[in-house]
């Protein structure tokens, strides 16, 4: 359903050209190591604050959260809450001391009082692991964005982003990275604000299809005989056996899919079948028609019933908009994957009417469904109630653990921490964090309106939640779509360039210069960092192509868990416990990193999404009781640091 | 010139650190309250709170808004070290 748009292409090309031009222009000023790694520490605090927003608001934040809210309601907003809350840890606890302690990298701050090779090595490895885990979803997101925007294959999207970012970082390091992030952060917040105003101004309607683009498809619910007369009903065999679906073949061979309703009628559905031949060739049939012959999904998502039986509301205020959604019935779309024996895989998309009040409560998505409903009561006479109770309890612990990881992870992300070195002093660090919190906070509140607006605008692609926000913009015109898509692309650029900077700094400054004792002057360090940036860029492109099918939000959650578990205990204890030793820091980072990484790799989520087990198999084989490790591994990091510090010599610095 | 500034700078750092920790503790409690309600008392989150919108939305938006207010409060109350002035 996405076609390359000429306007989008032109706007996109202008954005990329502008960003690259800026990089080359600024690149003239960054010849020294301090200029390359820390922009000479002269970035104005306001610019740095908006650049924080540009650095932090990744593709997962922008596309992922809006998409999750558009498909499942409140659950996407939980990420907004957790991500923003984490910034207070940065402001109140980390920002000012970190600025005073460090020079170029996160390892600098940890190591300042100790000059320990162990700290340099573990902190650098932690930076690399977290940056690479965070890079993968950004690159996957880039590919997902480019495909509908420019009509290119996924891997071309990854290669374009990787190449542009590598050029940005390799030309001027932190100087150009900062300005790209500043431009992107500002544009993102302003443009999303304008979109939200448009959403509120046009209010809610029960038939957005005709209003928005005139191409709506009336999904019919008809008596069975009306659907099947003169056609062939295909037998419900193989994977279709026992399913409520009816496949009806017309005389021309095309097949339509319907769902058997309780009253005997049939409801029209949407579906995609991908068949893989023995030679690996894939054929895609959408709604019974080959994709190559124009088969496509119809846009979906609308209000089924507004309060008081109205068909439209007119302009709404923010609270009115939320209240109206809460009191309405909304048509959302769910999907089911059916695997055939011949290498085919069919995804069935079906409508479901959900109460707005339920959509504005946590627990509606597959990720958080475990917290919906009350904890079961255990009846000693019924062993199965104990199992239900344990399962519900573990789901809740998983949720608490994720919210803890989001809260603690922000202040532990290396690419965020290095931004504190680009301002002149602790006061500027404080001010820029407050500006960052304001910009990021406004954006995250807007995600609620953007997501709910996309849910009800009749523009959703049921197969791709990441496109919810761009397609919402498309319903407002070609230019808003082009601008939003280009901003989304710069969103990826801004975050990826920050990550590549953090990783190249860890390689050259921490590993080669400080740990490896390689003698390099400032110019040589810059040259090495540029080469490292090219290497990290190529690795990021490769990983983005390899992990194409991975869930983006899932990977971001991993990065937050690992960052919080490996880095936060060391940072906090260094600042607040005078008996912290270099061995304590080294071991806390190593144990936090290994424990959190190990935990996620043997969790149910990883078994299902990485190793390809089915959900029941993954649940049976998982070695840990829930998937998000932070609840266990953050306290473990603190414990290791305290025990090892008590066992080793007290620092004297 | 350096010696009088050092104890003053240390006092400023201590003040800012304590202020940050107090504000952090307050926000932690409110954030933990939200998570607690989500896992233990969903019915409370479903109650109408503001303009008839449920507590889940009000609390969530409130947490984001409160973060901004507390950040500004910290900016206003925090002291600047002498050498930075």
Image (cartoon, rainbow, N blue to C red):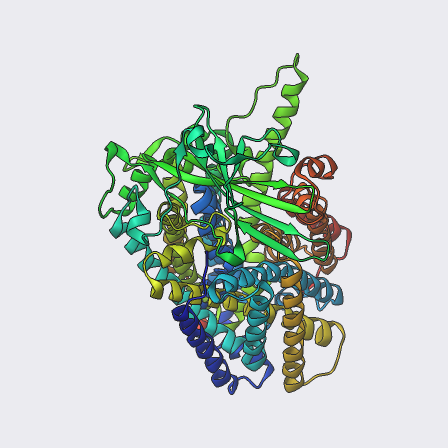
Q: Quadrant of the C terminus of chain A?
A: bottom right
Please name the residue shown 61% across and 18% down the image: A378
Of residue A249 and residue A429, the one placed in the foreground of this image is A249
**Residue B16 on image: x %, y %:** 46, 58
Report whether A556 appears left or right of A125: left
Residue located at (24% from left, 42% from top):
A312
Picture quadrant of residue A321: top left
**Is residue A521 shown above or below A371?**
below
Residue A349 location in percent, x, y? 50, 42
Query: Going by the picture, which residue comes out furthest to the left?
Result: A314
Percent position (x, y) of residue A260? 49, 29
In the image, residue A374 lies at what x, y percent?
51, 26
Number of numbered discs overlaid on the protein picture: 0
**Which image quarter: residue B77?**
bottom left
- Residue, far top: A381
Q: On the rendered structure, is A227 left or right of A232?
A: left
In this rendering, does residue A379 appear at all? Answer: yes
Specify whether A353 is left or right of A598: left
| Frontmost residue, A597 versus A103 | A597
Decide: is A386 above or below A95: above
Q: Nearer the viewer, residue A599 or A210?
A: A210
């Amino acid at each position: 359903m996405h076609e390359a748009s000429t306007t989008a292409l032109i706007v996109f090309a202008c954005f990329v050209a502008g960003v690259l031009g800026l990089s080359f222009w600024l690149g003239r000023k960054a010849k020294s190591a301090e200029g390359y790694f820390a922009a000479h520490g002269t970035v104005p605090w306001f610019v740095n604050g908006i650049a924080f927003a540009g650095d932090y608001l990744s593709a997962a934040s922008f596309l992922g959260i809006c998409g999750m809210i558009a498909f499942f309601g409140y659950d996407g907003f939980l990420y907004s809450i957790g991500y923003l809350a984490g910034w207070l840890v940065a402001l109140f606890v980390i920002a000012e001391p970190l600025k005073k302690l460090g020079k170029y990298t996160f390892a600098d701050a940890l190591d300042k009082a100790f000059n320990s090779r162990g700290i340099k090595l573990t902190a650098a490895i932690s930076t690399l692991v977290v940056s690479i885990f965070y890079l993968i979803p950004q690159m996957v997101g880039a590919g997902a964005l480019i495909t509908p925007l420019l009509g290119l294959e996924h891997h071309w999207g990854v290669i374009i982003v990787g190449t542009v970012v590598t050029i940005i970082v390799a030309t001027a390091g932190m100087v150009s990275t900062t300005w790209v992030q500043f431009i992107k952060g500002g544009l993102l917040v302003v443009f999303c604000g304008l979109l939200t105003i448009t959403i509120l101004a046009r209010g809610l309607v029960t038939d957005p299809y005709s209003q928005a683009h005139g191409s709506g498809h009336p999904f019919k619910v008809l008596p069975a005989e009306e659907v099947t007369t003169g056609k062939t009903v295909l037998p419900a065999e193989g994977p279709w056996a026992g399913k409520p679906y009816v496949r009806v073949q017309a005389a021309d061979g095309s097949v339509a899919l319907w769902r058997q309703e309780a009253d005997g009628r049939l409801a029209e559905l949407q579906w995609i079948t991908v068949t893989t031949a023995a030679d690996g060739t894939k054929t895609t049939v959408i709604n019974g028609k080959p994709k190559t012959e124009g088969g496509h999904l119809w846009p979906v998502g609308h209000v089924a019933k507004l309060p008081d039986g109205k068909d439209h509301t007119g302009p709404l205020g923010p609270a009115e908009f939320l209240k109206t959604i809460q009191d309405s019935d909304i048509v959302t779309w769910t999907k089911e994957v059916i695997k055939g024996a011949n290498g085919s895989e069919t995804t069935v998309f079906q409508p479901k009417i959900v109460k707005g009040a339920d959509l504005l409560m946590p627990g509606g998505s597959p990720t958080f469904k475990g917290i919906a409903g009350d904890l079961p009561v255990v009846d000693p006479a019924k062993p199965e109630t104990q199992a239900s109770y344990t399962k519900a309890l573990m789901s809740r612990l998983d949720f608490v653990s994720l919210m803890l990881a989001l809260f603690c992870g922000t202040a532990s992300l290396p690419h965020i921490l290095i931004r504190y070195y680009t301002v002149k002093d602790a006061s500027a660090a404080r001010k820029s964090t407050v500006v960052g919190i304001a910009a990021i906070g406004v954006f995250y509140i807007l995600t609620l309106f953007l997501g709910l607006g996309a849910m009800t605008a009749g523009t959703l692609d049921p197969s791709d939640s990441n496109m919810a926000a761009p397609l919402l913009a498309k319903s407002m015109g070609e230019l808003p779509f082009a601008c939003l898509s280009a901003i989304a692309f710069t969103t990826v650029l801004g975050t990826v360039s920050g990550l590549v900077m953090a990783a190249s700094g860890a390689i050259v400054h921490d590993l080669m210069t400080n740990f490896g004792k390689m003698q390099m002057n400032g110019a040589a360090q810059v040259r090495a960092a540029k080469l490292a940036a090219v290497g990290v860029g190529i690795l990021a492109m490769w990983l983005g192509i390899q992990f194409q099918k991975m869930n983006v939000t899932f990977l971001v959650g991993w990065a937050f868990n690992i960052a919080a578990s490996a880095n936060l205990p060391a940072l906090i204890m260094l600042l607040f416990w005078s008996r912290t030793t270099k061995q304590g820091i080294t071991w806390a980072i190593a144990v936090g990193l290994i424990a959190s990484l190990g935990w996620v790799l043997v969790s149910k989520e990883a078994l299902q999404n990485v190793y390809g087990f089915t959900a029941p198999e993954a649940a049976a084989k998982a070695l840990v009781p829930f998937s998000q490790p932070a609840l266990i591994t953050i306290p473990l990091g603190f414990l290791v640091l305290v025990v090892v510090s008590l066992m080793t010599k007290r620092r004297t610095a | 010139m350096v010696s009088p500034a050092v104890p003053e700078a240390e006092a400023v750092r201590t003040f800012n650190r304590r202020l940050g920790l107090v504000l952090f503790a307050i926000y932690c409690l409110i954030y933990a309250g939200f998570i607690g309600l989500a896992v233990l008392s969903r019915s409370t989150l479903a109650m109408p709170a503001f303009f008839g919108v449920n507590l889940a939305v009000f609390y969530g938006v409130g947490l984001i808004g409160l973060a901004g207010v507390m950040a500004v409060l910290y900016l206003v109350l925090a002291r600047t070290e002498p050498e930075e002035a």
